[in-house]
Image (cartoon, helix red, strand yellow):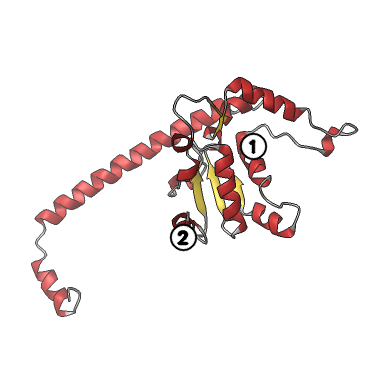
């Protein structure tokens, strides 16, 4: 954990890929980092998972929907339907968000479905102690936030899938071009005669 903190805290922005992370475990790590002063962006929130079957999680969310202000439901609690806001609300529940310190920490958090620009070209991190493959026993049931949100009225699952497929194909094209350029550069370096240039540079102390 100390190694993770040395890597994460006090970078400009830490970009976390939410894919196949357990919701609660991811949220607890994010809350701690936010309180430490780190800015965090969580992408692909629709692929975050919750332990338990879809039926179980639907029952739990239905019970959550019943919690409201009787006289005026607009006063709260607010039941967010999109996966990004579900993740955001879970993290908020682990912050003292009614204090100035907690509000400042929450302001350092952003959550998105998919990977919108400019984050699609940035290096993304994972949280190993929150990954489903590490924490959930093989064969146990789990529910993706995209499916759960769709069951309760979120209407953008197909759109996010379409945008993600376009992003992935574009990324594959970029990587193929990058590999080709690397191969061409290696070929050019192999046949280039740089003896005269190397001799001139060594006199200036570049190879010392």
Q: Comparing marks 2 and 1, which lies closer to the viewer? A: 2
Residue under label 1, please give it: 86
Q: Residue at x 47, y 58 (%)?
A: 2
Give percent across and percent down for residue 31: 61, 50
Query: Is 8 situated above or below 172?
Result: below
Query: Is 119 situated above or below 100?
Result: above
Q: Residue at x 76, y 52 (%)?
A: 98
Q: Which mark is residue 6?
A: 2
- Between 29 and 148, the one nearer to me in the picture: 29
Asked if residue 22 can be seen in this view, the reply is yes
N-terminal-most mark, 2 or 1 = 2
Other residues around mark 2 within 10 Å, as few (<14) / some (14–19) / many (≥20): few
Give percent across and percent down for residue 175: 32, 42
Q: Mark 1 falls on what kind of element?
A: helix
Q: Residue 62 occupies which quadrant of the picture?
A: top right
Q: Mark 2 falls on what kind of element?
A: helix
């Amino acid at each position: 954990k100390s190694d993770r903190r040395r890597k994460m805290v006090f970078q400009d922005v830490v970009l976390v890929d939410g894919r196949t992370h357990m919701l609660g475990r991811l949220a607890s790590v994010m809350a701690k980092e936010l309180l430490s002063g780190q800015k965090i962006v969580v992408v692909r929130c629709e692929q975050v998972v919750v332990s338990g079957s879809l039926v179980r999680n639907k029952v739990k969310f239905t019970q959550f929907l019943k919690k409201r202000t009787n006289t005026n439901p607009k006063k709260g609690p607010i039941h967010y339907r999109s996966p990004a806001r579900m993740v955001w609300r879970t993290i908020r529940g682990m912050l003292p968000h009614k204090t100035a310190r907690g509000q400042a920490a929450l302001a350092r958090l952003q959550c998105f479905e998919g990977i919108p620009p400019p984050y699609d070209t940035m290096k993304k991190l994972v949280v190993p102690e929150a990954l489903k493959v590490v924490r959930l026993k093989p064969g146990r049931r789990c529910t993706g936030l995209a499916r759960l949100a769709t069951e309760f009225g979120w209407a953008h699952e197909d759109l996010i899938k379409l945008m993600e497929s376009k992003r992935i194909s574009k990324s594959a094209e970029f990587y193929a071009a990058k590999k080709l350029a690397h191969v061409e550069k290696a070929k050019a370096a192999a046949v280039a005669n740089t003896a005269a240039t190397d001799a001139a540079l060594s006199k200036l102390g570049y190879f010392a």
